Amino acid sequence: MPASSISQVAGPGIALRGSDIDTDRIIPARFLRMITFDGLGDHAFEDDRKSNPEHPFNDGRFRDAAVLVANGNFGCGSSREHAPQALQRWGIQAIVGESFAEIFQGNCTVMGIPCVTASSADVAKLQDAVEADPSQPLDVDLAKKTVTCGNLVTQVDLPEGNRVSLLEGAWDATGMLLEGADAVREVANSLPYARGFERD
């Protein structure tokens, strides 16, 4: 079944201030031993949350947040896929930031999580708005390349290839491969060096 088109993500926001928040802080390394990603969301920012009781991911006002508003170089460090998996399982469906580590942004995109960038000033305004009224929804519109929060409309950007893949529902490469299994098998059978290696 093909992935669905993602043109818009709307929901309450959560502001996470600070630049260079790496993947080890998003999901500590000890959780990489988990056999599946199930339950990973419960451990998002676990060490930061334990050391700082006022961490926004501890704050019940933001428990229903769908849009994370971060600062610069978010998702830097190791390329672990567990980081976006933990965020998605916590409830995050889109991220707005000043900038992202490229591999992290790519890992998010193939999971259907848009990562859009805005200026430092606009990110600060969005963070202020989220903290002032956690119930106020943010609307991330990939077609218009805007994020709207109340009367605040912010221009955002993201790599065009990522935007197109999300808008066209082509972000799930594994799903597309499985959907085209018959075509893959047909091509494989036409290759002399691939004959005899077909697996069910």
Image (tube, rainbow, N blue to C red):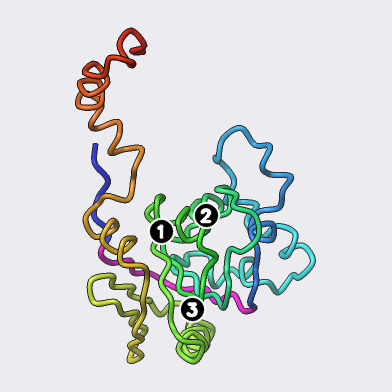
How far across and how far down the image is residue 193, in percent?
Answer: 33, 15
Identity of the amino acid at label 2?
A: Pro
For this orientation, the residue located farthest to the top is 196
Tag 1 near tag 2, CB within 8 Å:
yes
Vertical order, 189 against 114 (above or below): above
* Mark 3 residue type: Pro
Kindly state the secondary structure of the residue where label 1 is placed.
loop
Depth check, mark 3 against mark 2: the one in front is: 2
- Residue 140 position by quadrant: bottom left
Is residue 34 rendered magenta in the image? no
Could you tell which of marks 3 and 2 lies nearer the N-terminus? 2
Q: Quadrant of the C terminus?
A: top left
The structure residue drawn at horizontal position 62% and vertical position 79%, both measured from the top left corner, is 17
What is the CA distance from the residue labelled 1 to the residue labelled 3? 21 Å
Q: Residue 112 appears at what percent x and percent y?
A: 37, 54
Residue 72 lies left or right of residue 143; in this view the side is right
What segment carries the magenta color?
7-18
Q: At x 64% / y 58%, what residue is drawn?
A: 23
Q: Indicate the secondary structure of the residue bearing disc 3.
A: loop
Image location (x, y in percent) of residue 98:
50, 79
Residue assigned mark 1 = 113
Specify whether 74 is left or right of 51. Answer: left
Separation (CA) of disc 3 from disc 2: 22 Å
Few, some or many residues within 10 Å of mark 2 (<14, 14–19, 20+): many
Which numbered dot is residue 84? Answer: 2
Identity of the residue drawn at 57% across and 77% down: 72
- Label annotation for residue 134: 3
Sequence-earlier tag: 1 or 3: 1
Mark 1 or mark 2, earlier in chain? 2
Quarter of the picture holding the N terminus: top left
Q: Dominant secondary structure of the magenta stretch? A: strand
Residue 184 lies, with reference to residue 40, above or below; the image says above
